[in-house]
């Protein structure tokens, strides 16, 4: 059970101040560091929420983003919630050059990150050091990922994921990237996935997160990292006595498409595995390492029957697409994905009527992910007052929302990643194919570490991250405006009293039950 506001106010202030006393490093370390890239200038109309409860604007910011920043409520109010939703459903139309610039080049002592977008002399050297060279979408081929240390790749990929979540204007895209990363989970510690997961994140998840599900499914099926993780690369039938490897086939049906109750049988798993024989990926000891290819002689080219559909002999590599057509269009897949989407955006136990509406929209649109989301955000259940602030933020969401709400400068250093490790939710660290849990019950034991992070962040003890609480309060217009901005509504009288009595009001807000809800 999540602690109530009354319980928190009674005991929380002393607890978070006590537990935060020894956390992190001295604030002087932060001031000595350079390159804190993700500061957003506080400018324009920063009018905070004025309602006593979470209103529709704060609700949509809580669910479609990783947390509101100062001024976001006013911006969405000006454009309207429907327009904001449509904006987020079309990420390619959103100017995200600042975030892209951070990921590709980084910033160094820049007050306004947009200044990095000013024209430069054609021949002048770039004064900004490359932050994540392996993640450069334009220049790094899959095989070149092997040139990097696997631990460096994982850290860079994790930091880039965190920075995008904090800085990107394409917030719904980032939320859906995390959703599909869990859905098609790959543990980078297995085999050569430790190098290839970076390509999977770029070429599979990010490329299709707000696109077509069938295309996403196909990209995942032939992802070099997935072929390593679920043993597809050794799924072969070279002789009559060979039995295909069923690992990927089982997860394709159980996790990626139909769901555990989707109506498939063990025979269906075996037949799907037969269809997928022959697909492999070159390992790092071979020329063109990381290259995916289909080896005809290792494929079972006989007739198969999958979920009642006959697949004739002789299709070769075409068996893969025939199987994906069958499972992507199956009614159980639409229902399974609708359940997961409604669980993410509405409630841990999603309502049946909302799931039915989302599944119907997904099917009618031929697997369009934006169409399914558009239907979800239009359901009465998503928009009901009872739904607002009813979910518990997972740790990654909590940490990112704290950085966004406080307008923190951060370079997503190891201190932040270490905090996520302690919270049990560091990116790309889940070992099993089901991905990180969504339900609040899994995350209830993280409260103490959340309080520690809140006090350390506000107290300047998270290396590479700084919060200027005084400037934030001044720019927003005082304590009440700061509280309303962080909470997404006007503070209650009890919250206001606790804020002023705590001695560390901003840390108390970030550790409060209200902020941990979304």
Image (cartoon, rainbow, N blue to C red):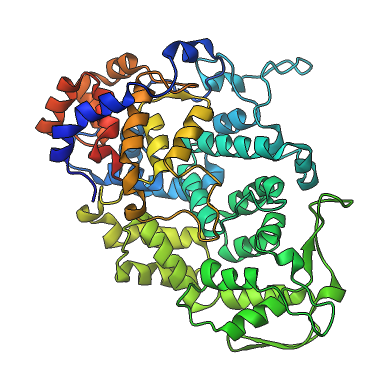
Q: Nearer the viewer, residue 321 or 380?
A: 321
The spot of residue 482 in percent (x, y) is 25, 25
Q: Does any portion of residue 64 appear in the rendered image?
A: yes
Quarter where residue 76 is shown: top left
Instruction: Identify the residue at image location x=80%, y=84%.
Output: 241
Q: Nearer the viewer, residue 126 or 433?
A: 433
Q: Does any portion of residue 167 appear in the rendered image?
A: no
Q: Nearer the viewer, residue 36 or 396?
A: 396
Left or right: 166, with 34 as reference point: left
Instruction: Identify the residue at image location x=56%, y=15%.
Output: 34
The spot of residue 514 in percent (x, y) is 24, 40
Give the answer, above or below, for where 400 lies relative to 205.
above
Total numbered labels placed on residues in the image: 0
Instruction: Identify the residue at image location x=62%, y=51%.
Output: 207
The spot of residue 89 in percent (x, y) is 47, 51
Q: In the rendered view of the protein, which quadrant contains the C terminus?
A: top left
Q: Nearer the viewer, residue 165 or 297?
A: 297
* Residue ranking furthest to the left: 493
The spot of residue 154 in percent (x, y) is 63, 40
Instruction: Identify the residue at image location x=64%, y=68%.
Output: 248
Left or right: 240, with 217 as reference point: right
């Amino acid at each position: 059970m999540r602690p109530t506001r009354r319980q928190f106010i009674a005991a929380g202030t002393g607890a978070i101040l006590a537990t935060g006393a020894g956390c992190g490093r001295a604030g002087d370390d932060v001031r000595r560091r350079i390159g804190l890239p993700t500061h957003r200038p506080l400018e324009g109309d920063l009018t905070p929420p004025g309602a006593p409860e979470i209103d529709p604007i704060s609700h949509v910011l809580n669910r479609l983003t990783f947390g509101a920043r100062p001024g976001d409520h006013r911006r969405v109010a000006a454009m309207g919630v429907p327009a904001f939703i449509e904006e987020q459903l079309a990420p390619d139309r959103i100017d995200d050059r600042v975030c892209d610039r951070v990921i590709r080049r980084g910033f160094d002592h820049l007050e306004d990150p947009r200044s990095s977008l000013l024209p430069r002399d054609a021949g002048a050297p770039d004064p900004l050091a490359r932050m994540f060279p392996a993640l450069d979408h334009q220049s790094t081929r899959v095989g070149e990922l092997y040139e990097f240390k696997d631990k460096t790749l994982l850290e860079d990929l994790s930091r880039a994921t965190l920075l995008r979540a904090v800085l990107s204007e394409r917030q719904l895209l980032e939320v859906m990237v995390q959703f599909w990363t869990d859905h098609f989970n790959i543990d980078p510690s297995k085999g050569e996935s430790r190098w290839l997961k970076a390509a999977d994140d770029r070429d599979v998840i990010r490329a299709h997160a707000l696109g077509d599900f069938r295309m996403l499914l196909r990209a995942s099926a032939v992802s070099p990292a997935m072929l390593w993780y679920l043993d597809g690369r050794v799924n072969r039938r070279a002789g009559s006595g060979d039995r295909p490897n069923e690992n990927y086939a089982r997860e394709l049906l159980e996790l990626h498409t139909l769901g555990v109750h989707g109506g498939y049988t063990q025979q269906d798993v075996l037949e799907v595995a037969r269809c997928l024989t022959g697909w492999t990926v070159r390992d790092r000891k071979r020329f063109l390492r990381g290259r995916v290819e289909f080896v005809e002689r290792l494929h079972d080219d006989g007739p198969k029957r999958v979920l009642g559909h006959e697949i004739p002999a002789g299709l070769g590599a075409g068996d893969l697409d025939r199987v994906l057509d069958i499972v992507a269009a199956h009614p159980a897949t639409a229902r399974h994905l609708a359940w997961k989407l409604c669980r993410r955006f509405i409630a841990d136990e999603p309502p049946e009527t909302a799931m039915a509406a989302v599944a119907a929209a997904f099917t009618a649109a031929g697997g369009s992910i934006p169409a399914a989301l558009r239907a979800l955000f239009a359901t009465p259940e998503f928009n009901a007052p009872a739904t607002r602030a009813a979910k518990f933020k997972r740790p990654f969401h909590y940490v990112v929302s704290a950085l966004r709400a406080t307008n923190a400068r951060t370079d997503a250093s190891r201190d932040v990643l270490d905090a996520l490790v302690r919270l049990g939710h560091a990116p790309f660290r889940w070992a099993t194919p089901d991905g990180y849990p969504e339900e609040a019950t899994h995350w209830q034991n993280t409260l103490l570490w959340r309080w520690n992070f809140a006090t350390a962040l506000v107290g300047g003890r998270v290396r590479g991250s700084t919060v200027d609480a005084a400037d934030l309060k001044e720019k927003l217009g005082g304590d009440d405006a700061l509280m309303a901005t962080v909470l997404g509504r006007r503070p209650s009288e009890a919250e206001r009293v606790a804020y002023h009595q705590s001695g560390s009001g901003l840390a108390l807000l970030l550790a409060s039950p209200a902020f941990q809800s979304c």
